Amino acid sequence: MELTALSVAEVQQKLRTREVSPTEVLRSLEARIMQVDPAIRGYLSRDFEAALQLAEKADVSLPLGGVPIAIKDVINVTGEPCTAGSKILQGYRSNYDATVISKLRAAGAIPFGRCNLDEFAMGSSTENSAFGHTRNPWDQSRVPGGSSGGSAAVVAADEAFAALGSDTGGSIRQPAALCGCVGLKPTYGRVSRFGLIAFASSLDQIGPFTKNVRDSALLLNVISGRDPQDSTSLNEPVSDYTAGLGRDLKGVRLGMPREYFIEGVDPQVDAAVRAAIKHYESLGAEIVEVSLPNTEHAVGVYYIIATAEASANLARFDGVRYGHRAADATGLLDHYGRTREEGFGPEVKRRIILGTYVLSSGYYDAYYLRAQKVRTLIRDDFTRAFEKCDAIIGPTSPEVAFKAGDRSDDPLKMYLADIFTIATNLAGICGLSLPCGFAEVEGKKLPVGLQLLAKPFAEAQLLQIAHAYEQSTDWHKARPAL
Amino acid sequence: MTANFDVRYTAQLARLHLSEEEIAKFQTQLSQVLAYVEKLEQVDVSGVEPTAHANAVFNVFREDATRDWFTAADALSNAPRTANQLFIVPKVIE
């Protein structure tokens, strides 16, 4: 078996027993990237020489010792670019590590490679990147999902053992579903956001992309915890998330929200998810029906709150401290206006306009305040549902990977594709997508993602439930032909 | 409310210059998005408290002490224009 086809746990085992060295692992990964990434284009940049230096002195006795991890290009790593997929940050070099990167380093991992994304993590297809499209490894005419499309594609194509992404409304889970890997969005406050370029601060969370559930638990072990640099990170104890893996599902109740099994879901997606639920029953889980009545409002609430927060966060791109600066400005307003016109792409501009409008004088109460109130109702829906079940089960995305270019000019249609993932971030709970089958479209096999959602800080049980399914099925072992 | 939505004016508030083409396009696209989000008007939110943060925390304090962080050179390392260890900004006061 190729070294690059291994999981994090498997390659770390080989490193620990000195069957392979960290430099051998890195070299084989680089060779794999050279082989497949010209077609996939999951990476925006990588610094092989810098990673090699880290590999030479890696401590393989640490939990992730010697394992290279790919990083979404929106998380700061000292000495590396961090473009956020935007021209406005072209040429920027980080001079500090995000907290998740410090934690990865302390666990022996080697940050290696910058993954493509929708500009400022705004999008569901990675087509909004200013630096080219990433392709879905299962069908290169299709998108990998987004916004963390590069992170998902490189893991699915075995050109990374694991990757970090960020999830504001589904940006980890949806690309994981469309590329056929495991994507985890931790509870809001579980993982520090320090060093993550902010999109919507009350919704953003960093999480791992992995080839299986155990690796997801391993990475969560490392990146979780309270960070004094992020006052929204919470002081909840970090358990060993691998400890509960392998437990059976006796007494576990899974809730099927009737609002997630509706018209408009691709019939092949619906069938794969229903088969997974049957499988869970055969494993001893009890299936109960639950209701999330405010689901239909989630997309509307999200596009008010997320754009409002984004319009404020992106005000920092002013052409003074970092990033692009327009030449020959005639005055201050011309300087700001043209710097931002030249630096931002169309989707980012749209969202800044929408966010500015919903916060503007006279409209704040009607849009923003009302959206925050409906957000409370969405949260309450989940609180009530979790009185009846341990986890919620359903499709991650209503569809499989769609064709590149299909809807890049129809923002509303693109937004509606996030219907099952968005409410998770509004409620601040944790969620995960894992492979549960394939759809056949135009002679190609396309992965289907199963979404599991759990209460705040219930990641251990979420991973345990996901692991039980994964270990009794073979979906996670399938690989695209490249 | 959508009727009052004016991309040109909002872009000024956002300090974002747009081409005439973008203004026309965004006016159409975002009016559709706004018409969609206005469905929220039908939701009964009387007596409902707004949620600003999913897992709210309040008054997170730390000791008010200095610590090592960016040097001036670090802070300036990505600036498009600098002089004498300072950021160069456009003239603000005439």
Image (tube, rainbow, N blue to C red):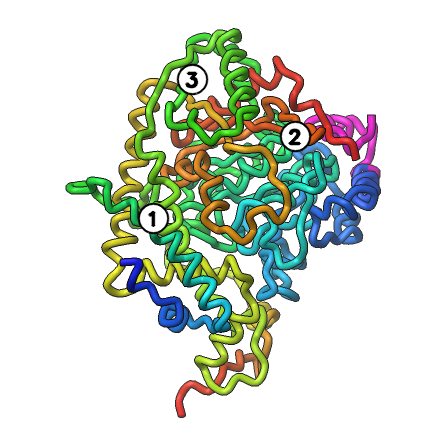
Q: Nearer the viewer, residue B45 or B39?
A: B39
Q: Position of residue A50 (x, y in %)?
A: 76, 53
Chain ID for label 3? A
> Dot 3 surroundings within 10 Å: few (below 14), some, or many (20 or more)?
many
Q: Which of pointers 3 and 2 indicates the residue nearer the eye?
A: 2
With A453 as the anchor, is A293 left or right in this view?
A: left
Q: Position of residue A399 (x, y in %)?
A: 54, 33
Question: Label 3 vs label 1: CA separation?
Answer: 31 Å
Which image quarter holds the N terminus of chain A?
A: top right
Residue at image mark 3: A254
With A370 as the anchor, is A248 left or right in this view?
A: right
Q: Which secondary structure lies at badge 3?
A: strand
What range of the chain is rendered magenta?
A1-24
Chain ID for label 2? A
Q: Position of residue A18 (x, y in %)?
A: 81, 29
Chain ID for label 1? B
Indicate which disc residue A441 carries: 2
Dot placed on the residue nearer the N-terminal end, 3 or 2:
3
Task: State whether residue A319 appears in this view.
Answer: yes
Disc count in the image? 3
Residue at image mark 1: B37
Task: State whether residue A241 appears in this view.
Answer: no
Q: Nearer the viewer, residue B1 or A232?
A: B1
Q: Position of residue A200 (x, y in %)?
A: 43, 51
Question: Label 2 vs label 1: CA separation?
Answer: 33 Å
Q: Is residue A275 above or below residue A97?
A: above
Q: Which secondary structure lies at badge 1?
A: helix
Q: Disc 2 residue type?
A: Val
Q: Nearer the viewer, residue A82 or A273?
A: A273
Q: Are marks 3 and 1 in contact (CB under 8 Å)?
A: no
